[in-house]
Image (cartoon, rainbow, N blue to C red):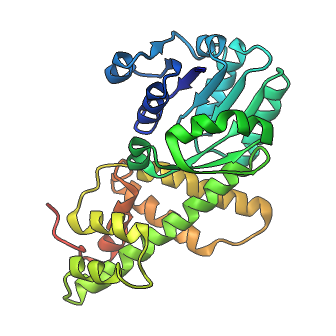
Amino acid sequence: MATLGFIGLGIMGTPMAGHLLAGGHTLYVHTRSKVPQALLDAGAKPCASNAEVAQKADIIFTMVPDTPDVQKVLFADDGVAQGLTPGRIVVDMSSIGPVETKDFARRISELGCDYLDAPVSGGEVGAKAASLTIMVGGKQDVFDKVEPLFKLMGKNITLVGGNGDGQTCKVANQIIVALNIQAVAEALLFASKAGADPAKVRQALMGGFAASRILEVHGERMVKRTFQPGFRINLHQKDLNLALSGAKQLGVTLPTTAVAQQLMSACAANGMDGLDHSALCRAVELMSHHTIAPDV
């Protein structure tokens, strides 16, 4: 059994850490707020700082919201870098910028340690079910060491390439997800405004070529008006901003990604940035003066 660390115990991090504990591993933890009681009951060992986690664990996982958060967790005065000794492995499972990730990996490498970027897809449901898709960037031999731990948290686990490539893959994932949410929202809005039952339209579409995981899960959310976050709009906004800033650096055009980002910005401007990203439909509903289904 391994001695592990986990930093960042939010909606995603808490169940992910729980799966590592359930795998029989020793787990040292730190988070900005109180460590969830369920993890303490399962044997998690709380630490006073990120540096303390790094001092005690051989493999340290981080799962925090954004690029500046990862930088702070790793390199602040009480950060992970302060507690590392050569031979340790840092695994960042947050969704952050690929360019910054390469710099973080370089700085950790200079301390004699290894680094994997391993962002995930699947949301809260996938985190709880240990069915996350995990997109990894880093060295093959380091990936091989950590892969058994990834398998405790996810099912589709791929070493995409070197450091930063995992984050690039996650940005690509978020483009596809956002545009699918937008497509489902527009289709169900059209059907509803035309007088059809959006629930039955969704059911019919699930049997055809338009079927998708987004139509299945988020289409149901749009019809049932259940927008409690599995993955918040403000986090998807952040990911689309990474896509658009990356596109500018690369000199490519992502026109429909820009539209999806603006729709999410419209939701945020109306106080909905804390809702699930399926609530992107609220932007097109507001512009159309019609809702897919009555709010409950």
How many numbered marks does the figure carry? 0
Residue at the spot 64% in from the left edge and 39% down from the top edge: 147
Q: Nearer the viewer, residue 115 or 266?
A: 115
Q: Which quarter of the rendered picture does the C terminus lie within? A: bottom left
Q: Residue at x 40, y 45 (%)?
A: 129
The answer to whether one can see residue 139 in this image is no
Q: Residue at x 45, y 43 (%)?
A: 130
In which image quadrant can residue 151 be found?
top right
Residue 167 location (% of width, % of height): 67, 49
For the point 46% across and 13% down, the residue is 46
175 up-or-down from 229: above or below: below
Name the one closer to the observer, 267 or 80.
80
Residue 142 appears in the figure:
yes
Q: Could you tell me residue 158's position as x and y percent?
A: 66, 52
Quarter placement of the N terminus: top right
In depth, the one of 116 and 195 nearer the eye is 116
In-image side of 178 versus 295 (left or right): right
Q: x and y percent of residue 67 in the render? A: 63, 39
Left or right of residue 246, residue 193 in this image:
left
Of the pair 262 and 104, the residue shown nearer to us: 104
Residue 252: x %, y % from top left = 75, 70
Tell me: residue 24, above or below residue 225.
above
Q: Outermost residue toward the bottom?
A: 194
Horizontal relation, residue 214 to residue 223: left or right: right
